[in-house]
Amino acid sequence: METTSQTVSPAARVIGDEHGPEAGDGRRFDTDIVFRWLVTAAGIGVLLLLGAIILVMVVGGMKAMTAFGPAFLFTSVWNPVTQHFGALAPVFGTIVTSLIGLILAVPLAFGASFWLTQMAPARVAAGVGMAVQLLAAVPSIIFGMWGFFVIVPLMAHYVQPTARHWFGHVPGIGALVQGAPFGTGLLTGGLILAVMVMPFITAVMCDVFASIPPVLKESGFGLGATRWEVMRNVILPWSRSAVVGSVVLGMGRAMGETMAVTFVIGNSNRIGWSLFAPGNTIASLIALEFPESPAGSLKLSSLMALGAILMVLSFLALAASRVLLGMSKKGDGR
């Protein structure tokens, strides 16, 4: 009778030892099953946590939504004396200041990240990158105090008078620069938000740009492309998803910022089209009014409803970014 000899590799022996008779008789601890259950529990836990937060906000704000109905979303009055509350003014302030912050922060963050990863010497990039990370670690209340003592006087004494002198008589633009030169207002709040979110966006973009395969950039330079052409035709298409994600991350931080904006926005529940007019945001209004809201009151319910609206705005911003990203991919034929 002829027998055949087989050579068993060391890896096969290890696998055979792990899945041999001892693995099936319950005497061996199966780490793969434990790991699978742990990661599954983590994923479900995140969904449950998000659902619990949404549920608390919606249930807490149901009293205000029932009392005022849809008019709660389109009323700018916030009067605790008459128990009449509306969400339009803080929603308007949140959207305007966030847009101003992103319009100012995104170009600066993109330029800084591209320079740090593609053009700056290694030692300089390391030092500046560390400074950007330190700027991201500064507490928000420090930004608020800095804005109140530095930015507000500059806006009151120099920026607004100059803007009103040059553009106050221009139709359409003149309405954006009207108002008393107090220094606080929507534009000041947007400036503070730009300073706060710029380090976060820069850090994410730096990581993305640094992870681009060098062969892609070298191919572009080898074909005679300039830095602008490589950035436009190679780097941006490759990192589009991450860049959009960094902008959405900055938008979420801007919408939810509280103390820094509270210092410089003026805290007035009104809608003014002037960039220098005082206003309010959802987060700053909640921070100011929440300690004075008794449990079970209509005012507290209105604040909870504002929290739910803020979450909806964040979700809408994320959904819009996904839609725009999908449209851009289709336009590129991908």
Image (cartoon, rainbow, N blue to C red):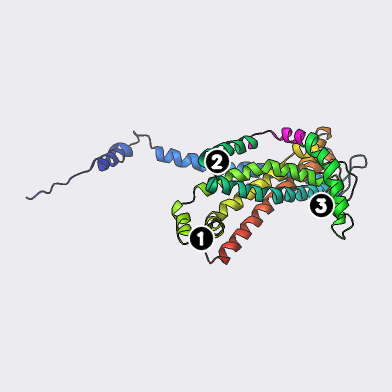
- Tell me whether the residue at label 1 lies in contact with that at label 2, contact meaning CB atoms closer than 8 angstroms: no
165 within the magenta span? no
Asked whether residue 43 is in view, the answer is: yes
Residue under circle 2?
125
In percent of the image, x 80 and y 35: which residue is there? Answer: 148
Residue under circle 1?
225
Q: CA distance from mark 3 to mark 1?
A: 51 Å
- Where does the image place residue 9, in percent across and percent down from the top left? 23, 43
- Where does the image place residue 72, in percent across and percent down from the top left? 83, 50
In percent of the image, x 52 and y 41: which residue is there? Answer: 41
Amino acid on which the number 3 mark rests in the picture: Leu
Looking at the rendered structure, the number of numbered marks drawn on it comes to 3
In depth, the one of 25 and 30 nearer the eye is 30
Q: Quadrant of residue 169?
A: bottom right
Q: Please, what secondary structure does the residue beneath circle 1 have?
A: loop
In the displayed structure image, the side of residue 15 where residue 121 appears, left or right: right
Q: CA distance from mark 2 to mark 3?
A: 47 Å
In the displayed structure image, the side of residue 334 where residue 309 appears, left or right: right
In the displayed structure image, the side of residue 111 where residue 283 appears, left or right: right
In percent of the image, x 80 and y 50: which residue is there? Answer: 92
Q: CA distance from mark 1 to mark 2?
A: 24 Å
Amino acid on which the number 2 mark rests in the picture: Ala
In depth, the one of 44 and 179 nearer the eye is 179
Q: Which residues are magenta?
A: 136-146
Q: Please, what secondary structure does the residue beneath circle 2 have?
A: helix
Q: Return the residue found at the far right.
A: 82
Which label's residue is closer to the chain start, 3 or 1?
Answer: 3
Q: Which mark is residue 73?
A: 3
Q: Quadrant of residue 8?
A: top left
Mark 3 is surrounded, within 10 Å at the Cα level, by few (under 14), some (14 to 19) or many (20 or more) other residues, namely: some
Amino acid on which the number 1 mark rests in the picture: Ala
